[in-house]
Image: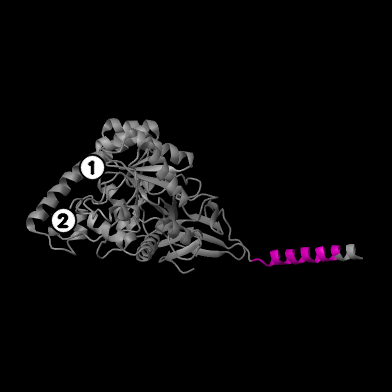
Amino acid sequence: MPRRTTLWMLLIVALASTSELGAQPAVPVTLVNAARLLDPRTGNVLAPAAVLIEGDKIKQVGSSSQIGVPPGANVIDLGAATLLPGLIDGHTHLFLDIVVPPEAEMQRRLNPLFAPGELLAIVESPTKRALTAAQSGREDLQSGITTVRNLGHSGIDGDTELRDAINAGRIPGPRILAAGRKLITRGSYLQNLNPALADAILQQEFLLLDGGTDQARHAVRQNVFQNVDVIKVTVEENLTVAELTAVVEEAHRQHLKVAAHAVDTASIQTAIDAGADSIEHGDEATDKQVMQMRAKGIFFDLTPTFYGGGYLKIAEPTIVISPAARAERVRSAARRKERYDQLIQRVLKSGVKFASGSDWSWFYPGKTRGQASAAVFVNLHKAGMPALDVIRAVTVNAAEMLGWSDRIGTIEAGKFADLVAVSGDPVADIGELERVRFVMKGGQVVRNELSSH
């Protein structure tokens, strides 16, 4: 009898479990129809287009005639719009919202445009920074930026915690690859701090590379403890190739890529020699260096943040600029524009892998974070890059740079259902990237100004 009773109890439990499984809600199914779908990898356009989505992934992509409407599916008709993959900002700083300081203050500081606002951000409450970053992430998402790589300036664990909160569905925001604390040599960003407080301040934002190769490896491991997705290093003349090589080796051992901030020629060469995975900014890269990057498979992450006088656009609404300072800014912008136009042509001719990031850290009066970031992408076209290559730089190319080609960057079966739509043709008018009217992330509609659904 006891054995028979046990068998009956097991059968009842099994039937109850089966009933519970059967009662679970079905995976939501959505069909998105649009007049056109651009494949950034090939440049081909599918017209008309349909995307079938199950849960958070794309199940099928084809013409409207090929994909029928499954029973119970939610149908979203975007009319004459063009579908694109969700945009990717390969270089951003969600935890910074720097207001340009007055001219007199900048004349009295080292690193005057950036350091005062950065220091203020560091000494503010981490809670306040997290709330500001959450707003920035939501604004990015609203503008069609569904994935970002946050490369430092977010405190010890700000971006990893924000990433996890977004992934858990507690707050809206883009997918985040988090870098944790940036690896730097002492004096890279903030100088002349109170000696009694300097280390405590710096350790809230950076991991210092002051102790040779052993310290370099230890810094990577400290970030690994915070569960980062990528390692960010600032490369300047006082960082050796040996130290950066140790960072790269340790990061790769931990299956992490290394993004190297390098602007001047010497720093770029250090990053190349050490085998960094991407070179951020790279404004002074020579032809030889671009070819070395191509040969090594290093990504060139272009950041035309202040191209074409961007500084004045964010500064003039908030501060008084003297006529002399304004004239010098205009002359400087013209010189920088000419050099950057030449850089873009060298990049395109070289065949080096390239992507783009906004490097956005600033308060832009009258624009959200997302709107300001999208405007930076468009700067690439103003600098001479064809529109299709600009789109590639913030979709399929950026996905490869991040190591997420299997998840994002194109509208293909098996990838996350991260879609944006614009009213016109973004290849004919790249400005459409600043006018995104439909956003979907992981199968969930974030914004829709094109149709009822």
How would you rate the neighbour count of disc 2 (Cα within 10 Å): few for under 14, some for 14-19, many for 20 or more? some
* Furthest residue in direction left, as rendered: 324
Residue located 23% across and 61% down the image: 99
Residue hosting label 2: 106
Please tell me whether mark 1 sits on a helix, a strand or a loop.
Answer: helix
Residue 9 lies, with reference to residue 412, above or below; the image says below
Secondary structure, magenta segment, majority class: helix
How is colour applied across the structure in the image? Answer: one colour
| Occupied quadrant, residue 293 | top left
- Where is residue 100? Give x, y as percent: 21, 59
Q: Is residue 351 above or below residue 187?
A: above
Picture coordinates of residue 412, whole percent (x, y):
51, 49
Q: CA distance from mark 2 to mark 1?
A: 28 Å
Q: Earlier in the sequence, mark 2 or mark 1?
A: 2
Seen from the viewer's position, the closer of residues 105 and 423 is 105
Left or right of 3? Residue 24 is left
Residue at the spot of label 1: 341
- Does the magenta segment cover residue 9? yes
Residue under the point 42% across and 43% down: 218
Horizontal side of residue 323 vs 407, given as left or right: left
**Which numbered mark, 2 or 1, is in the foreground of this view?**
2
Query: In x, y percent, where is residue 381?
Result: 28, 47
**Kind of residue at badge 1:** Asp
The three-letter amino acid code for the residue at tag 2 is Met
Q: Is residue 132 above or below residue 295?
A: below
- Taking the view exactly as shown, the residue that stands out farthest to the front is 196
Q: Position of residue 35 (x, y in %)?
A: 45, 57
Please check the rendered image and state whether residue 398 is part of the magenta-colored stretch, yes or no: no
The boundaries of the magenta stretch are 6-24
Tell me the quarter of the image containing the N terminus.
bottom right
Q: In the current view of this chain or complex, which residue is farthest to the bottom? A: 452
